[in-house]
Amino acid sequence: MGGAALAAGGLLLPGTAQAAPRLTTPSPVALDLPTVPAPRSERTAGSALRPFGRHLAFGADPSQQVVVSWQVPDAVTAPFVRIGVQPGDFGAPVAAEVRTLVSKLSWQKPVEDQPPVKPTTVTQYYLHAQLDQLIPDTTYYYVVGHQGYDPAGQHTRLGDVASFRTAPAPGRGAGFTFTAFGDQGIGYNAAATGHLIAGLDPAFHLHMGDLSYANAGGSGKTSDAYDARLWDSFFVQNDPVASRTPWMPAIGNHEMEPWYGSDGYGGMRARFTTPDNAWSQSTGIYSWRYQNVGLISLDGNDVCYNTPANLDYTKGKQKKWLESRLAALRADSGIDFIVVYLHQCTYSTCHDNGAELGAQQDWAPLFDKYQVDLVLSGHNHVYERTDPIRAGKATRKVASGDTVNPVKDGTTYVVAGGGGGGLYSFPVSDTYLGHETGNDKPVPMVVSERGGHEQTVKVTWSRVRYTGYCLVAVDVTPGAAGKPARMEVRSLTEDGTAVDRVTVQRG
C-alpha cells in the first residue's frame, strides 16, 4: 500500500525497522483535482478545526494494513494519526495525506438554502493515513489531529478516541462475522441500518455502492442533480460505526460523478482509500482476503446496459483481471470461500432497476467456472436471494434454513439494496422467513439489452423476497475436527429480525 510504518514502540510486527515518522503534509495523489491550497493567515486557527467523518478501510492484507480516513472543515497543516494499544497511550504522529476536492456551485443543486452572497466553489478536505506492518489480531486505539489540535494527552475527550482490530494472520483465527448492504443514503432508515452494524460488531462491512446519493440522478451525466456537501452528511452519519469497523465500498451508478475526471471517479479517489490493486487507478476494483475468505470488489458500471455512461470503459481489463483473481483464489488451499460484491444485480426480479444482462454474459460464466460461493449486490432497494444458479438456471430449490453446496449446486446471488434508500417493489408477492407464500410459478425478470431496449423473461430461481430495509450478516466458521468450513448468510431487518437464513458449505 505504500503506507507509513508505525514507530510507536511495540506496535510493529517483530523484526521490522523503526524510523520516526515525518510530521508533514504529503503531496496530493494524482486525482486530476486541484492541489491543496496553502493555509492563509486569515483562515480559522487549527485549534478550532475539528476532524469529522472518520472511516476505516482494510488494505489487501487486513492483518497488517489499515487506512484511517477523515475530513476537516478547512485547510490544516500537518494532519496526522496517533495509535496505541492502550486507549490513552498513543505513539508518535504518523503523517496523513491530504486530498482536496473542489466542486463548482454552478454544477450543483444544493438541497439546503444558500445565502445571497456565497462562494462559487465548495472545497472538501479528505485526509488519509495508511498504516502498514501492524500486528495481526490486535486492537489499536487512535486519534486524529493536525497542527494546533492534538487530542492525545491528559485532556483527550472520550469521543476523540476510536479503535480498530487487525485481522488474525491467515489460518490462525477463529470464526468471524461480516455485514453488507447497498444503497444507503442519508436519513433515519440509513442510520438505523448503520446502527445495526454496530450492534453486530462485525470484522468489516461491505457497502455495495450508491453510498450518499449526493448525485441524485445516477446517470453519470452532468445533467444529474448533485450536491457535493451531502457527502459530509454521509460521513457524519456513519462516523460512529465506520470509525471502528472498516467499510469496504464498491462503486455504484450514483458514484459516477462526471465533474471529476474522465471516468467520473475522482471524487471516490479523494474520499476513500481501498486496495485498488487490479491495475493503476483501478478505482473500486480490487481483491483482498480475510482469513479463509477471498473477496473481490467489481465495478458493475463497466457492464451496465441500462446506465451506460461507463459501459466498457475498462475495455475488457476488468474481465481479464477477474478471471485471473478467481483462478488464484480458487487455487489457494487457505481459501475456503470466494465472495464477490458489486453494485448492479446479476440476477434480480425487481423491475425498478432490473437485472444486468452484461453481468450475466461477461461475469456469470466465470462465477460458474471458479465456483464462486456468494455474489452480493445492491442497486434494487429490496432483499432477494436466488436458489443456487449455474448457467443461468436454478439447480434446486433452497428454502430459508437449508444448506447450499456450491461445488454441486452453483452460486447463490443475494440482492441487499435495503440499506436506507427509498424502497422498490417486486412484481409478485414477498416470501420470506415466517411469511412464506406460494412460490412455484415463474417470475418475470427485466433486463436491458446493449442498446437499452428492455426484455422480460420468466425465471424460477427467485426464492426469497422481502420489501424492507435490512442488511446481510455472514457468519464464517473455519473447518475443524473433520467438519467443513461454512458461511451462514442471514438477512436482518433494522430491529434485528431475520427474514432469511441459508448456510453455504463446500463438501
Image: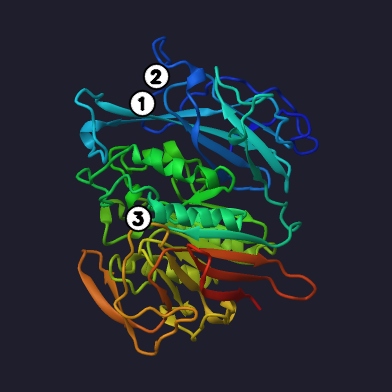
Q: Amino acid at mark 2?
A: Pro
Q: Amino acid at mark 3?
A: Asn
Would residue 307 be seen by someone viewing this image from the given angle?
yes
The Cα atoms of the two marked residues, 2 and 3, are separated by 33 Å
Marks 2 and 1 close (CB-CB < 8 Å): yes
Q: Residues within 10 Å of mark 2 (few under 14, many from 20)?
A: few
User: Which of the 4 image quarters holds residue 263?
Assistant: top left
Would residue 325 be seen by someone viewing this image from the given angle?
no
The structure residue drawn at horizontal position 49% and vertical position 53%, both measured from the top left corner, is 194
Relative placement, left or right, of 26 versus 183 is right
Q: Quadrant of the C terminus?
A: bottom right
- In front here: 40 or 220? 40
User: Which of the 4 image quarters holds residue 78?
Assistant: top right
Q: Quadrant of the N terminus?
A: top right
The structure residue drawn at horizontal position 59% and vertical position 45%, both measured from the top left corner, is 244
Sequence-wise first label, 3 or 1:
1
Q: Which percent across, then down, holds residue 398?
A: 51, 83
The Cα atoms of the two marked residues, 2 and 1, are separated by 8 Å
**Residue ID for mark 1:** 34
Foreground: disc 2 or disc 3: 2
Marks 3 and 1 close (CB-CB < 8 Å): no
- Tag on residue 37? 2
**Residue ID for mark 3:** 301
Classify mark 2: helix, strand or loop: loop
